[in-house]
Image (tube, rainbow, N blue to C red):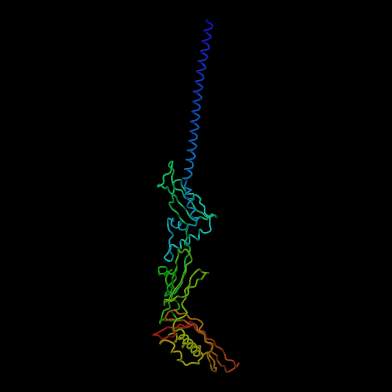
Amino acid sequence: MKSSGNGDKTNTNQKNGKSKINFFLVFLISWLVIVTAFIAWFLLRFNSFAAVYESEYEASLPYHTAEAITQKFNDQDVDYIVASMTSKPAVTAFEDENVVHEYVASLINGHHFDYIETDSSREDEPEYYIKTEDGILVARVELKEDKSVSLPYGFKAWEQESLEFFTAASFEVDITAPETYTVYINGVQVTDMYLDGEIVPSELTQYVDPYAVIPGTAKYLVKGLYKRPTVTAVDYLGNECECVYDSQNDKYVVGFIKDFEGREELEEFAIDFTSTFANYISQDAGNYALDKYFPSGSAALSYIKRNSSRELYTRHGAVSIHNEEIKDVIVYSEDVVYMEIYVEQWMEMYWGSDEPEVIPTDAHVYFVNIDGKWLVGGIQY
């Protein structure tokens, strides 16, 4: 009986021991499962957070703003570029904002643009250059934090703070014109504020002094233009006159006009004077033949009469005037006109060939209008 009782106790202890071991295993396994599940859940959540965080961080980087601005250049959005310039290009009185648009368009047309970070760029103040495909820098962009935008995780949003477009108004205009003429650039009058130095008096006044003054020369210099302008001028009467561009010296020259009312009458007077002058020198006109062409008391006439060249002519026969020509005319003012007059004096000689001796006279004469009458003010020899 005792033996039987011990056997029962042994079996009972074994069963109780197995029950305790099974419970512990269940607990251990359960705990491991829970921990593993938590770790898996945590890793999934962390990976998801990390992915979102990285995505938000990447999206908040300032180069995206620089990229969007650069795209405006590639889109040829001139209006945006001009409107975004922090300092608008200075425009003279002879141009307007339209010329700036045209200038910017000419610089960006046909190019592809990219951006690079500048050496002076900082984390809190990003700065970028915009450059062409061949590395030419055309603009600098500075960014600042856009505090009106709230991003996750405290990231900063960025906006343009300044855009400096590297414009250069490289054209300048050098104009020379008579001081009595009015010059225009793109239809706008060039005033005395653009004079480059003092007006230079004309040395030719000596030939009409004391009866008149030949206008001096004004030189104008206008800088800061974005393209080559249209230069025009009007004479002292307000009529349009020629303005010539000297490409070799990059200058505009306004010359005196060549025509005026009453030119034909003065040309006849000029040829008549020159013919008489030639005959006077050859002693084929009287001592007072020239007096009617000069003002009273003329120093020029006195010089001609004192000139001993008349005595050099030898005896000869009849003379006649041929091939009269007005070679040049310059109208300095309504009271001063210059003419170059050419005549040929055909002179019969007492010996040699039967053909007449041809004596050319090329006179450079300055005529002055005194009390409505044209007279010889002086002769340039």
Residue at (47% x, 45% y) in the render: 59
Q: How many labels does the image show?
A: 0
Between 133 and 374, the residue placed more toward the observer is: 133
* Residue at the limit of the structure toward the top, as seen here: 1
218 is higher (above) or lower (below) than 85: below
194 is higher (above) or lower (below) than 113: below
Residue 255 pos. (x, y %): 47, 75
* Residue at the limit of the structure toward the right, as seen here: 353
Residue 239 pos. (x, y %): 43, 76
Residue at (41% x, 46% y) in the render: 149
Residue 217 pos. (x, y %): 44, 74
Between 246 and 312, the residue placed more toward the observer is: 246
158 vs 344, left or right, is left
Residue 177 pos. (x, y %): 45, 73
Between 274 and 70, the residue placed more toward the observer is: 70
Residue at (52% x, 59% y) in the render: 109
18 vs 188, left or right, is right
* Residue at the limit of the structure toward the left, as seen here: 371
The image quarter in which residue 94 lies? bottom left
